[in-house]
Image (cartoon, coloured by chain):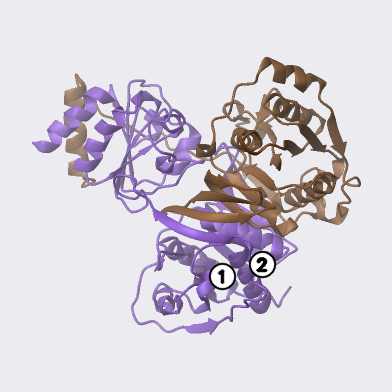
Amino acid sequence: MHILACVKQTPKSDNVKIDPVTGCLIRSGAESAMNPFDEYALEEAVVLKEQMGGSVSVITMGPPAAENVLRESIARGADKVYQLSDVAFAGSDTWSTSYALAKGAGKIDELEKIDVIICGKQTNDSDTGHIGPQISAWLNWPNAAFVKKVLAVSENSLTVERLTEAGTDVIELPFPCVISVVKEISNPRVRSIKGRMAAKRAEVVKWTAEDIAADKNKLGIKNCPTRVVKSFSPTRSTNAVVVEGANAREKAAKLVEMLKENKYI
Amino acid sequence: MNEWKNVWILAEVSQGKISPTAYELLTAGKSLAEDLGEKLCAVLLGKEVKKLAQDLFDHGAEVVYVCDAPELENYIDDIYAKTLNGMIQAYKPNKFLLPATNLGRSLSAKTAIFAATGLTADATEVVINKEDGQLHATRPTFGGNLMATITCARTRPEMCSLRPMSYPRAPKTEGKNGEVVEFAFDGQKYTSLAKFLKFIKSEGEGLDLSETDVIVAGGRGVGKAEGFELLGKLAARLGGAVAASRAPVDNGWIEYRRQIGLTGRTVKPKLYIACGISGQIQHMAGCSGADVLVAINKDPDAPIMKMAHYAVEGDLYEVIPAMLEALDK
C-alpha cells in the first residue's frame, strides 16, 4: 500500500504576533513547525503502512526552508519526501495550492501508484480545510473529509467514519482516494533516534512548477481566483464586570443573583 | 460576467430537516441581494426535499432550486459537488453562500474546483462592495489573530462558506410565495465511487451544542476528566450542555465534538460559562457570539477575565458547587 501524506510548514500557533499598528502578522522570529493537524495525517499514514505493508510518501509545497517538515516526516516514519518549491507558487490561494499538490501527487502516482492521500483537517494558519477535498477534485478521486477513524482497510478500499454535526457517517472509499482527518484519528508518535538519523540523511526530492507540468496560469498570487484585499486585528471587548465577594460562596451567590436579575437564567 | 446573476445560499438538509444555518444564510444573503438588486435564491439537494421549499420561501427565499433524487439521500462529496456544479453552470449565480459546517466546508471546496472559481472559507461577515459589486468576505485567520477580507474578482460565482452563528436566523412569515425551479439529477454524470454505508446518530450525553441556550465550558483549569461531571451538573441545572476548550479534548477528558473554538465548533448561546479557560483567541473565536459570557478563573489576569461580561475570580471547584447551592435557594 502506498500512502501520500500532505503536510505544510506553518507558524507555531502560540507564536503568532500581530503588529498593533499595521495589523499585519510579524513573521520574523516566528518559529515554524509542521501544521499540527498534519501530524495526525502523517501518523495515520504510518499506521496504515505498518498494518498493510508498503510505504509512506510525503509532499509539501513551500519555500526552501519548508524542507524541515519533510525531514521531520522522515523522523516520524515516512519513506520518501517531495517538496514543491518555485516562485511561481508564491501567494497561491487554496484553489492554486490544491492544483499544484494534485499535479505533484500525479507525478508521484506515475512513479509509484498511490492508494490513499491523507491530509490534515485544516492548517493552523489559514484554517480553510479546502485542500483535501480540492486535491480530490483535481484528481477526480473520491474523498471524505473530517474522517475520525479508519474502520477497515483492504487491498483495494478504506472504510472510514466521518464526523458530522449530528453523528457519524460510515463511508467506503475504493482506492485511489483522498481523506482529510481530524485529530481523533491517531496519536502522533515521538521521533525515534533512528528516525532522526534517517531524517538527516534523507534525500528531499525537489520539484518546480515545470517539473510537475503545472500550468503557470493557474499558479501564484497573480493567477489564483481569490485575493486578500485587507487584513486587520480583531477587536475585543474589555468591559468585564468583576463579581465581588469575600469568598467563592459569596461570589457565586452574587453571580447567580445578577444572572437572574438580568433574566439570563 | 453580466450573465451571472442572483445570490444563492445552500440550504443544508440534515436528517430530512432544513438545518438552521440555512436561515442564517438567508439573512446574510438578503442584504447582498438587496444591495445588488438581484434575487435571493436557495438551493435544496436531497431525497424528497421539494416539500421543504415552502419553508425557505417563508424565510425570505424568492426562488428555490431543487434537485430531488434518491441518489442524494446521503452526503457523498462527488455526487453533491457534481450536482451543484451542474446547477451552477445551468443557472449562473453571481454569489453563492454555503454553511461552514462539516458538509458545507467539504462540499464548497470540491465544488469550487469543478466550477473553476474562487472560494473564501469560514467567513464571519459578507458585504457587497458598492463600487464594483464584488463580494467582500471577512474571515478570521492565523488562529483568529488576524482578520482578512477576501475577494474573487475574475470568476463567478464568488463562493464563500459562512461560519455558523455569524448571522441571526431570518424571521418566518408563513404563506409567502416563491418560484420552485426543479433541476433534473443526471445519474450518468453525477456519480462517485464512494459508497455511503450508514449513519450513526451521536450518542453523546446532553444536548446538541447548537441547540442549547446555555453552555458550561471547561478548560485546562478543570484539570481532570471527572471535573466535567461537576460542569455537567451545573449545565443540567441550567438546562444546558457541556463543552470544552482545546486542552481538555487534547488530554482526552472530553470528546472532540464538544470542542469550542477555531478548530472546534462555533456556538452562540444566550449564556456561556467558561470555567478554567484562559481565553486564548482560538477559543474565543468559537464563543464570542454568546449574549452573555461568564468567566470563572483562579487567575485574575487570564485574558478571558477582560473579555467576559462577568468575571469571577476563584476556583471552579468552589464556585460551581456554591452556584448550584445558590440556584437551589
> SS at mark 2?
loop
Contact between labelled residues 1 and 2, with CB atoms less than 8 Å apart: yes
What residue did someone put label 1 on?
Answer: B8
Marks 2 and 1 belong to one chain: yes
The quadrant the C terminus of chain A occupies is top left
Does A74 appear above or below B114? above
Q: To which quarter of the image does residue B92 belong?
A: bottom right
The answer to which of marks 2 and 1 sits earlier in the sequence is 1
Apparent colour of chain B: purple
Task: Say whether residue B32 is left or right of residue B217.
Answer: right
The three-letter code of the residue at mark 2 reads Pro
In what element is the residue under mark 1? strand
- Taking the view exactly as shown, the residue that stands out farthest to the top is A193
- On residue B266, the disc is none
Disc 2: which chain? B
User: Mark 1 belongs to which subunit?
Assistant: B
The amino acid sitting under disc 1 is Trp
Examine the rendered structure and indicate whether residue A31 appears above or below residue A151. above
- Label 2 belongs to which residue? B157
Mark 2 residue crowding within 10 angstroms, few (<14) / some (14–19) / many (20+): many
| Outermost left residue | B329
Question: Residue at left 70%, top 48%?
Answer: A115
Give the letter of the brown chain.
A
- Asked if one can make out residue B326 in the rendered structure from this viewpoint, the answer is yes
